[in-house]
Image (spheres, grey):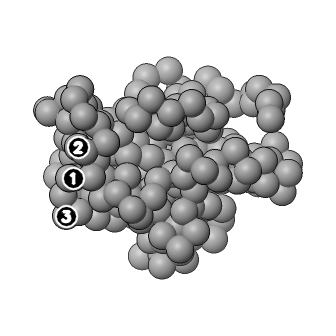
Amino acid sequence: MQFPANPFRSLFKDDYSVFLDDDNAVNQFADHLSKSLPSIYTNDIVFVCIGTDRSTGDSLGPLVGTLLGELNVSRFHYYGTLDEPIHALNLSEQLETIKNKYKNPFIIAVDACLGRVKSIGSVRLSNGPLKPGAAMKKDLPLVGEINLTGVVNVSGFMEFYVLQNTRLSLVMKMAKFIARSIKETESKLTGQTAL
């Protein structure tokens, strides 16, 4: 199903990337994320956390969704958890459900990705939609007005096995970082102090 173009496509021009161990990384990432969102009072903001718990490297999205629930994120909506993952088999259906439930939602895709060795452990905020399943050569719909991706391992060769053999420790650290950044963003937008 094709959806109309969203008017918020070009809120910022440059990608922003941070490493988990950078000083004040959560606050800095939350600052950039909050500046790239429309008003939470005019648009429903929906995080679509993509991935599967059947692959360590690809579990980043569902882990983020699960942690958002544990952090009691309430101003934002989120889909894709360990119990109810959004993956290749149900992505189109879930996007249609979201588009039908919310009027003109602002969607942020959250997913793991592969990249260069020196980028492993970084989280990137990018303008425009995410192309999920690109490393696996899957033909899936584009997701989001902006996207958050975590570089979990190196790309270039046998990506399926690389994702399967990614360290859970790194993926968990990234998921906690992204979830805390989203919670901090919510707090910044509502004028509260994050937990």
The residues tagged by marks 1 and 2 sit, at their Cα atoms, a distance apart of: 6 Å
Give the alpha-carbon distance from disc 3 to disc 2, as whole Å: 15 Å
User: Which residue sits at x=21%, y=52%?
Assistant: 166
Residue at which label 3 appears = 169
Q: State the image coordinates of residue 174 (x, y, percent, origin top left).
A: 30, 56
Q: Residues within 10 Å of mark 1 (few under 14, many from 20)?
A: some
Q: Residue 188, can we see it? A: no
Quick one: quadrant of the C terminus?
A: bottom left
From this view, report whether residue 3 is shown above or below residue 103.
Answer: above
Quick check: 102 above or below 8?
below
Q: Give the answer, above or below, for where 122 lies relative to 66.
A: above
Please state which amino acid type lies under the numbered disc 2.
Val
Image quarter of residue 141? top right
Residue at which label 1 appears: 166
Query: How many badges with numbers are in the image?
Result: 3
Label 2: few (<14), some or many (≥20) within 10 Å?
some
The percent position of residue 39, horizontal first and vertical second, equals: 70, 47
Please give the residue where the numbered disc 2 appears in the rendered image: 162
Q: Position of residue 182 (x, y in %)?
A: 48, 58
Nearest to the observer: residue 11 or residue 6:
6
Disc 1 versus disc 3: nearer the observer: 1
Of 83 and 146, nearer the camera is 83
Are the residues at dot 1 and dot 2 in contact (C-beta closer than 8 Å)? yes
Q: Is residue 50 left or right of residue 181?
A: right
Q: Label 1, label 3: how many angstroms apart (C-alpha)?
A: 9 Å
The amino acid type, in three-letter code, at marker 3 is Ser
- Left or right of 176? Residue 5 is right
